[in-house]
Amino acid sequence: MTVFAENAAPPDAPARARAVVDLDALRANVRALRERASGAQLMAVVKSDAYGHGAVPCARAALDAGATWLGTATPQEALALRAAGLPGRIMCWLWTPGGPWREAIEADLDVSVSGMWALEEVVAAARAVSRTARVQLKADTGLGRNGCQPGEDWAALVDAALRAQAEGLVRITGLWSHFACADEPGHPSITAQLTLFRAMLAEAEARGVTPEVRHIANSPATLTLPETHFDLVRTGIAVYGLSPSPEIGTPADFGLRPVMTLTASVALVKQVPGGHGVSYGHHYTTPGATTLGLVPVGYADGIPRHASGTGPVLVGGKWRTVAGRIAMDQFVVDLGGDEPPPGAEAVLFGPGDRGEPTAEDWAQAAGTIAYEIVTRIGTRVPRIHVHADGSGA
């Protein structure tokens, strides 16, 4: 079964651009990750519209493949999943004062608490709606972002949460943290964070917390650090078939397959003489008579401008490189005299099976990470979800 995005052309018709999302590949990735984290439950993180892949269909596919939790950053993302009928456990962790606590409690979300202000707000909301809030306490073990500091702050937060639990206002369902450098093999912070996490777990449990799940492992830790798996692993980028870092291995090394293929239709092919300037600033000038192809996507579609002059594209079975600046809506490739017809497919990235570039290739070209490449693909590019029913057809 194929699900078409609104206003999208069918798969056999030329389109300005499309991102084909292979849900069978996503299911296979989830199964591979579950096998690697055997003994722990798996959370599929679908924040930021499933890293640009489409949150609702990706969440459904992940649950089909055995994920037992879904994770989002914002409560609004989690509430949208509930509104779409997604069942089971959904956790959200990025809160600001006044956040939609009541709605989250009524939707049976697991909410993360990193400080006393958040606990006070969720307790007040639970009292207002006469329901028990599911709360997970986050420890800052060294990342230095969200999370409660060890020592007196942690002790006070744990004790306050236990008092609220005794009143029936909250249920402490989890204790968790997040790695800073799990994608850098051998980094000393990994051991330091894991040691501190164990100590903060022990302190909370000694005070009376009996969590359902304890978790710290993200995608790189799930793939390479089995000692970090505890009761639950949180897998984000790996679900979508991308490696968290080239340093720890390629997707194929972990039995993963990239889920998204981004293509566009060549809009124009023309012959130009040598010395012809190309795109803004004339940062590229043709070295001799050649043909230029116009690819109708640009930084408004999420194609990184930093990849100007370096971004790879497969056109007519050959790798081409962005010639000159990437503009808001389009860029140019030097076809070296080849003349594919207008409407010919330009493959920006995919799994690499057909010799096409991958998201990691674009990340290297832009000096960034593959996470950013897929997540930034904009809303002008329709997502075409294939194999929605798991048929593999």
Image (cartoon, rainbow, N blue to C red):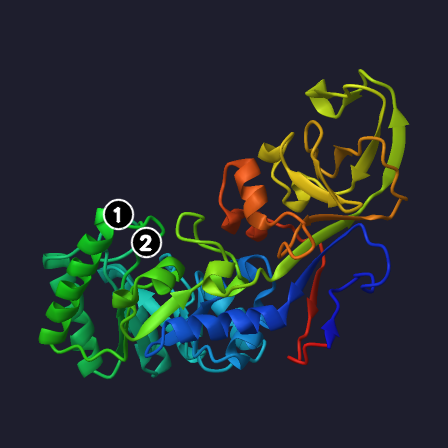
The residue nearer to you, when weighing 241 against 112, is 241
Q: Amino acid at mark 2?
A: Ala
Which numbered circle lies on residue 182?
Answer: 2
What amino acid is labelled 1 in the image? His
Instruction: From the image, tell me which residue sits under label 1.
Output: 187
Q: Quick check: 210 above or below 153?
A: below
- The answer to whether the residues at label 2 and label 1 have Cβ atoms under 8 Å apart is yes
Left/right placement of residue 333 relative to residue 33 reads right
Q: Which x, y percent locates residue 363? A: 54, 43
Residue 41 figure quarter: bottom left
In the rendered structure, the answer to whether residue 110 lies left or right of residue 344 reads: left
Relative to 307, is 165 on the left or the right? left
- Up/down of 325 relative to 257, above or below: above
- Residue 364 percent coordinates (x, y): 53, 39
In percent of width and height, residue 283 lies at 68, 20
Front in this rendered view, residue 171 or 306 = 306
